[in-house]
Image: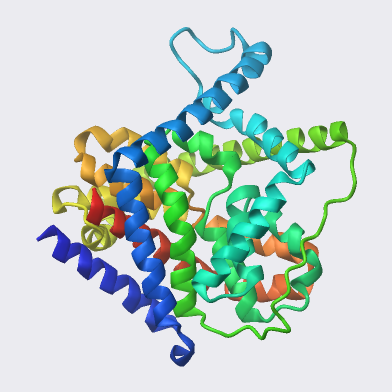
Amino acid sequence: MRYLISFCGLLLVFGLALLMSKNKKEIKYKNILMMLIIQFLLAAFLLNTKFGYILIKGITKVFDHLLSYANTGISFVFGGLANKGETPFFLSVLLPIIFVSVLIGILQHFKILPFFMKWIGLFLSKLNGMGKLESYNAVASAMVGQSEVFITVKKQLDKLTPQRMYTLCASAMSTVSMAVVGAYMTMIEPKYVVTAIVLNLFGGFIIVSIINPYRVKESEDILTIEDEHKQSFFQMLGEYIMDGFKVAIIVGAMLIGFVALMDMINSLFDIVFGISFQGILGYIFAPIAFLMGVPWADAISAGGIMATKLVTNEFVAMINLGEVAKSMSAHSVGIISVFLVSFANFSSIGIIAGAVKGLSEKQGNIVARFGLKLLYGATLVSILTATIVGFVI
């Protein structure tokens, strides 16, 4: 029965995507079917096989070591600040982002990341039937972040059509950057973080291919990656350290604001209506959670967490999931965990539009105009990934 429900969830995702499609004749159904099959195979491999278990364990150990190295620096600066037995969220989850940012900078500086991003992107372009630039951008977004990725292709931005810009932005919103992966792994099970990152990559191509189908002429399918201005190694280190610190501070500030605001709104709704705001959102999103494979007993709680992620960000939603996870089934927690691993929320619209506008005012204005459609598509990617995971766990 649950497989039938999840199948209905898949039909819902594709139906909602088709509803927004303006050029159904250009949809490449063969490529979409191929990528959907790959998603199922990857989900089954990562979550249900011994090799998948070993792979995820290996990745988890790498990030555990990175976080332990990061904690060495954090303890040196903030040692004694935390009470014994307590670890403040800012110190344990956000500040390690600085160290991961430094590692990304080193891999960028020595041209290791650009090499992998370019060739993986070229391989994916053969699979998804999209342009080389679109495929590269999806991989690069997962490596360097949703705003920084546009710097690497800034020479081509002004030449892109609105359709291609939508694809680039949707990829950036559907994925998460490596800088915050370690933070996620301290809040939800690492196997769901890894699975979501891989599946979202293909899910982004699938949803965009339906909502925003187009053909790229061979003469236009040119990938030009912008080299960063030449810096010395230590200049680069300083820049990436500060970039990581800015991300940690910005996320921390957003959490303070959003968590406090959500608590106030919940209290007001509770006084006026006898139910919290998140409780109301839970009822609204519960049917979607149910079709994703969440049992109805957990659907309202799951729906509230999904809605929280949409209107605030994934960190706030992960905190909420941690508070109620013990009262939910492991199956429900797995599905919702995967749903939360993306940048699909309202604040990302402003982040992406601002990043593009800083490089090209014309394209920034175009991105701002299709902001809600962008969020719509990225949210469908999260639902698609969660539904597939609901099938295999």
Rendering coords of residue 214 (x, y %):
56, 84
Q: Is residue 306 visible?
A: yes
Q: Image quadrant for the N terminus?
A: bottom left
Nearer to the camera, 69 or 372: 69
Instruction: Establish if 351 lies above or below 246.
Output: below
Quick check: 61 left or right of 1? right
The image quadrant that residue 146 belongs to is bottom right
Nearer to the camera, 393 or 182: 393
Name the residue located 43 percent from the left edge and 64 percent from the top edge: 203
Instruction: Establish if 300 lies above or below 248.
Output: below
The image quadrant that residue 226 belongs to is bottom right
Quick check: 161 left or right of 344? right
The image quadrant that residue 281 belongs to is bottom left
Instruction: Establish if 381 lies above or below 233.
Output: below
Rendering coords of residue 344 (x, y %):
49, 58
Q: Is residue 262 visible?
A: no
Instruction: Establish if 178 lies above or below 225.
Output: above
Name the residue located 38 percent from the left edge and 34 percent from the top edge: 54
Picture mark count? 0
Colour approach in the figure: rainbow
Name the residue located 41 percent from the left edge and 37 percent from the top edge: 56
Question: Can you name the residue that lies furthest to the bottom here?
Answer: 25
Name the residue located 21 percent from the left edge and 58 percent from the top edge: 290
Rendering coords of residue 88 (x, y %):
51, 22
Quick check: 126 left or right of 392? right
Quick check: 381 left or right of 257? left
Rendering coords of residue 340 (x, y %):
41, 49
